[in-house]
Image: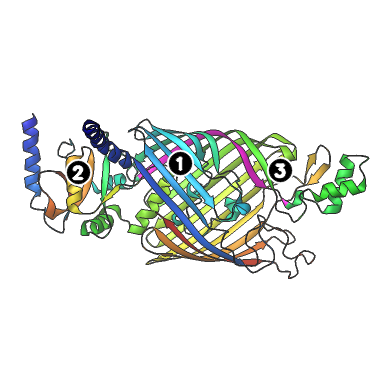
Amino acid sequence: MKRVVSLSGLVLAGLMPLAAQALDNVAINGFLTAGATYGDSEVPLQDGSFGNEVSFTTDSRIGIQLLADVNSNVSVTSQLFARADEEAYNMSADWAFVTYKVNDPLSFRMGKIKLTTFLISDYYDVGYAYPWIRPPMEVYSSNPIETISGADILYRLNFGDNQLLIQPYFGDSHGEEALQPQETLYDHATQSGFIQMLYPGISPGAADAMADSMPLKGDINFVEFEVHKMRGINIALSSNIFTVRAGYLKTLVSAESFGVEDEEAEFASVGFTVDWKNVVIYSEYFERDITGLAQLAFPDQKGSYVTLGYRTGRLLTHVTQAKTEDNDSPATATHPIFGPLPLAPLEQESTTVGFRYELGAGAAMKFEVQNIKPKEGTRGLLLYNPNDPSTNKDPSDSINIYSFAIDVVF
Amino acid sequence: MTQLKRLLALAILAASSGLAVAGNVAIITHPGSSAVGITAEEAANIYLGKTGVFGKGSSVKPVDQKPGTPAHTKFYKEVLNKSDQQFKAHWSRIMFSGKGRPPQELDSDIAVKNWVASNPNSIGYVDGSVLDNSVKILLIIP
């Protein structure tokens, strides 16, 4: 018995340094945003967020990241992520990948990786890492894909305090969900008419019942889509003061419920950011180009924003002007059954005034007021046109959103 | 040859010991390192995660001090040119995009000196008052 005890003692003593070693090789970090939003209009955004009441779930979220060094060349990174309001965003953001570091400038990553299409898409959910409560939607909502299953190469070249990043990537994405545009949803009578056209001989009552069970105009509906053979590149040049980046990707998109199969999509974006003395600037531009029927869900769009900020001590005051507009979309896309269907690009402008106050290192408090103005006669990124008396009791050409948030990293 | 190197290191230490006083910050490495010096820009690149190598391509592991120590304040202001908040935001961008992790933080000058003295390929910074020959000095920030 005594021998057993001393043996296990030996084993324990032997394991102790191993355990300490293991802990040294694993880093657990996290981020959290607790937010409150209020919209001054009955008209919500097209994803259903920002209603005419105080919401604590729109922006609130938490993420935990685990990084483990397997050896000096191989590491594993994974992130678990949860939103308070899964309904509104419905994006799967948890990712996990293996990094193989060949040498200092060159690494390969494989697994479920973040798709870098914009300046901050790598850390889109980490509110602490950027000035706004949420990145400008006119640009950031244009790409519904947050992660891909695939591989990328990180090639980082240093000269002086500058670094050039060249990041080609390849992959697929399954089970993604995108908001179905309101323009492809019909009121009950029209939907019932389509069903009678589709199933000749069906009784009007049965067609009505079928229409009832389908998403109709005014509903917030997500459609599943898949991307295959995505290939793209992200190039960034950064110093201690600025970052300039450009990216381009090409992919095939399928959405079964729309009858879309392997339509080609292209996405290009450029942007820069400056953080110099008391001045903070962010600006980005994108163009989205899609062929065929997929345009019903993703019309050709282009968009941009400019953010100017000024830091006084712990306070950053910033102003953002953003817009999204048509990128020469054709007037219609031809559906095999319903014939030509009208395409409706989403056009709007918004102005945001915001404040970020540092609560020591690792925590910040933010407040923002955003005015969203859809192009006259259209709904922009809202659920419906706020100026249409038939859908809105209190017509107005713009809506305001007030937001407060606390961002923490730990 | 080894003896010559040791003599050289001692000479460098002796020459710089006049600067090794409280209030100065010294960037230090393991005594076995072949490096003989570092520029403030090279040190900033290592602490900001832009490079993981130093000198003739050997990998380097930086160690940081917790905010609040005089050495931390001086190092951030004069070498990194960043506030604690800017440093934290910078690293949260790298860390949460899965591209690296920030330097480990230790509590005091002594803890950093001891850690550097016992870890080859390490680099740290300490107040001049704690320097001794258990570590090699790469740069003095007066």
Instruction: Name the residue that disc number 2 marks.
Output: B116
Three-letter amino acid code of the residue under disc 2: Val
Tag 1 and tag 2, C-beta contact below 8 Å = no
- The chain that hosts pointer 3 is A
Tag 3 and tag 1, C-beta contact below 8 Å = no
Image check: A218 left or right of A317? right
For the C terminus of chain B, the image quarter is bottom left
Other residues around mark 1 within 10 Å, as few (<14) / some (14–19) / many (≥20): many
Q: Residue at x 59, y 55 (%)?
A: A85
The magenta region covers A162-181
Q: Which residue is drawn at 60% across and 54% down?
A: A138
Is the same chain shared between marks 1 and 2?
no
Image check: A21 left or right of A142? left
Q: Can you give x and y, in whole percent of width and height, for residue A247 in the image? A: 53, 41
Q: How far apart are marks 1 and 2 (CA)?
A: 30 Å
- The chain that hosts pointer 1 is A
The image quadrant of residue A380 is bottom right
Q: Mark number for residue A295?
A: 3
Three-letter amino acid code of the residue under disc 1: Ser
Other residues around mark 2 within 10 Å, as few (<14) / some (14–19) / many (≥20): many
Instruction: Name the residue that disc number 1 marks.
Output: A78
Other residues around mark 3 within 10 Å, as few (<14) / some (14–19) / many (≥20): many
Under tag 1, what secondary structure?
A: strand
What secondary structure prevails in the magenta region?
strand
